């Protein structure tokens, strides 16, 4: 809930007591999407951190921050030397306003338009992240037209008894998903007063200790009032202030993210090494356990040596008396291209090679068993390690190179519009042609359903199939099709044909334009373009 409107509201109240009357010394950036405002007294400076990454924006106060000597850039130099008079939040939006002597800073959470704007008293506008002039003007006009408060927004919630919880965000857009989920969890019957439930949840945000919920099993971490019960957790930690809770939350989240990243690298290499080692053990065990032919080859060599006078070049075999057995006649194979002495040496060499091979295999078997035991020991240790240094030591020992981190599918999903249908089915919508390609070629799984409005340009739409053994109802597929039609050029049409198929039948050939694909097979649904009932838009919180 670090991005939830009401926690931002609570942050504004707490931050106001710290920021008011303080001088701005520097505003700079040295990390992508992160802006640092240095403020305070000459001998006691603090730092306001504003992170404008669209998927994980946040604002918080830090007591320390180390500015780099290189690769650091000053931003909004006009703000330096000015005094902070107040910090407020828009009454209906996730926009935080920091008032200065003759200007204001606006921290805005707006999806891909999440940004920090600087507007002086002459309405000269500049932004942290680059925006085209039209977008900058539109955004600035909108934020300047808002009303801002420095107190808690006591939202007067009025819900009808037959309202569904997914209708709440249509009436009150500033209410986030976690709040709705918590309210739904508390709503035990149809007789419950939804308005009172929701008001109680909102009041707890301002009144109850902020708590960080940590789930070691999934790696999930959440920030919410201590009374919230909607999050699975193995541990929770409560704080007196939201700023303290956010500081812990952000630090823990970074730690967990880095830990999972390193674990993923190690686990992948470990699985690969274990597979190779097990295969090698099986092969070596086969060699060691089979009967050695050393003595047999040696006897055949001696029998040929005894009968060397009978061996002629060109013979492919010879019959001799077996003096090592019961004097029966046995046939020994020869190489017709070799002279007699070479044929004899062949068998002695085979005997020697067999002996060396068995001895080497036994040595390798011991070494491979040691390696296997070490790998299994590492596999066991990984389950309990909670120290990044230890993980890096394992990586060093296993000679794993920490290459540039490749985004996982969980990271990529933040780039798309996300809907939930009937509180169960996750639907992802591409935002533009390039984003469509990313959704279809990198994110979608083979058995996910893929949708696109037929014969018009529009978004690629994917419904995640979590369980391939469970059929998705036709009614749900129609809702997804309606979404695909809504996110297309046919949005205003009456009825729209929408193509759908499994993702495995969607291919993109080399040389195809961005966002263009080919379908190997398809079905069609006729639907009305709309965001259907039971379809909830997920806002990153």
Image (spheres, rainbow, N blue to C red):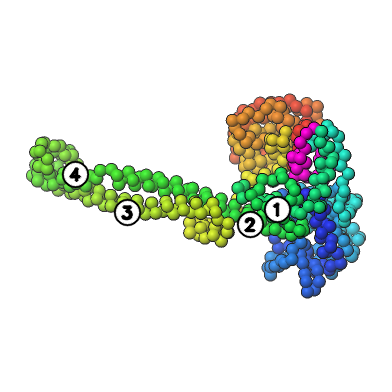
Cα distance in 3D space between marks 4 and 1? 73 Å
**Residue bearing the label numbered 3:** 363
Instruction: Calculate the distance from the C-alpha at mark 2 to the C-alpha at mark 4.
Output: 63 Å
Q: Nearer the viewer, mark 1 or mark 2?
A: 1
| Chain-order first, disc 4 or disc 1 | 1
Q: CA distance from mark 2 to mark 3?
A: 43 Å
Of pointers 2 and 3, the one earlier in the residue sequence: 2
Residue 139 x/y as whole percent: 84, 50
Q: Residues within 10 Å of mark 4 (few under 14, many from 20)?
A: few
Question: Mark 1 or mark 3: which is in front?
Answer: 1
Tell me the residue at 82%/67% (across/down): 24
Image quarter for residue 447? top right
Real-space Cα separation, disc 4 to disc 3, in angstroms: 23 Å
Return the disc, 1 or 3, that comes first in the chain's sequence.
1
Of badges 4 and 3, nearer the viewer stands: 3
Q: Report the Cα–Cα distance between label 1 and label 3.
A: 53 Å
Q: Provide the residue designation for mark 1.
A: 212
In the rendered structure, which segment of residues is drawn in magenta? Answer: 166-190
Q: Which image quarter: residue 190?
A: top right
The residue that disc 2 covers is: 255
> In the image, is residue 218 above or below residue 317?
below
Left/right of residue 459 with respect to residue 406 in the rendered view: right
Residue at x 52% of width, y 49% of height: 268
Q: Which residue is mark 4?
A: 296
User: Between disc 1 and disc 2, whose residue precedes?
Assistant: 1
Asked whether, in this view, residue 355 is left or right of residue 386, the answer is: left
Residue 243 rendering spot, x and y as whole percentages: 76, 59
Could you say which is closer to the camera, residue 351 or residue 271?
271
Q: Is residue 34 visible?
A: no
């Amino acid at each position: 809930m670090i991005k939830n409107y009401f926690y931002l509201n609570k942050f504004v109240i707490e931050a106001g007591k710290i920021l008011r009357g303080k001088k701005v010394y520097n505003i700079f950036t040295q990390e992508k999407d992160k802006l640092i405002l240095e403020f305070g007294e000459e001998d006691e400076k603090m730092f306001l951190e504003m992170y404008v990454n669209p998927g994980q924006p946040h604002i918080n106060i830090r007591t320390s921050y180390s500015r780099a000597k290189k690769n650091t850039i000053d931003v909004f130099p006009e703000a330096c030397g000015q005094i902070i008079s107040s910090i407020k939040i828009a009454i209906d939006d996730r926009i935080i306003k920091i008032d200065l002597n003759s200007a204001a800073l606006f921290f805005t959470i707006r999806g891909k338009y999440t940004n920090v704007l600087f507007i002086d008293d002459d309405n000269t506008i500049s932004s942290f992240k680059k925006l085209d002039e039209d977008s900058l003007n539109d955004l600035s006009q909108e934020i300047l037209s808002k009303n801002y408060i420095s107190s808690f927004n006591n939202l007067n919630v009025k819900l009808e008894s037959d309202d569904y919880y997914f209708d709440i965000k249509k009436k009150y857009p500033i209410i986030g998903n976690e709040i709705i989920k918590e309210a739904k969890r508390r709503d035990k019957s149809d007789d419950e007063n939804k308005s009172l439930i929701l008001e109680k949840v909102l009041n707890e945000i301002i009144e109850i200790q902020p708590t960080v919920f940590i789930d070691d099993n999934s790696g999930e971490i959440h920030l919410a009032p201590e009374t919230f019960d909607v999050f699975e957790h193995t541990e929770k930690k409560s704080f007196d202030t939201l700023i303290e809770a956010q500081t812990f939350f952000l630090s823990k989240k970074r730690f967990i993210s880095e830990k999972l990243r390193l674990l993923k690298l190690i686990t992948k290499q470990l699985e690969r090494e274990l597979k190779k080692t097990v295969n090698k053990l099986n092969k070596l065990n086969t060699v060691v356990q089979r009967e050695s032919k050393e003595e047999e080859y040696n006897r055949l060599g001696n029998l040929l040596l005894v009968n060397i006078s009978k061996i002629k070049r060109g013979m492919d075999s010879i019959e001799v008396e077996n003096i090592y057995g019961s004097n029966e006649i046995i046939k020994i194979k020869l190489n017709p291209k070799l002279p007699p002495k070479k044929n004899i040496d062949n068998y002695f060499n085979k005997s020697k090679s067999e002996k060396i091979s068995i001895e080497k295999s036994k040595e390798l078997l011991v070494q491979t068993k040691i390696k296997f035991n070490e790998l299994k020991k590492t596999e066991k240790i990984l389950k309990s390690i909670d120290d990044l240094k230890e993980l890096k030591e394992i990586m060093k020992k296993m000679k794993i190179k920490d290459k540039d981190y490749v985004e996982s599918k969980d990271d990529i999903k933040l780039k798309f519009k996300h809907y939930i249908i009937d509180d169960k089915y996750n639907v992802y919508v591409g935002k533009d042609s390039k984003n469509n390609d990313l959704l279809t070629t990198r994110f979608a799984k083979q058995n996910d359903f893929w949708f696109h409005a037929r014969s018009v340009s529009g978004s690629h739409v994917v419904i995640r199939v979590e369980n391939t053994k469970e059929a998705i109802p036709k009614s749900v597929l129609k809702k997804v099709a309606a979404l695909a039609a809504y996110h297309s050029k046919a949005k205003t049409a009456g009825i729209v044909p929408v193509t759908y198929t499994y993702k495995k039948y969607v291919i993109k050939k080399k040389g195809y334009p961005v966002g263009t694909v080919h379908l190997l097979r398809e079905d069609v649904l006729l639907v009305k373009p709309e965001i259907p009932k039971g379809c909830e838009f997920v806002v990153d919180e």
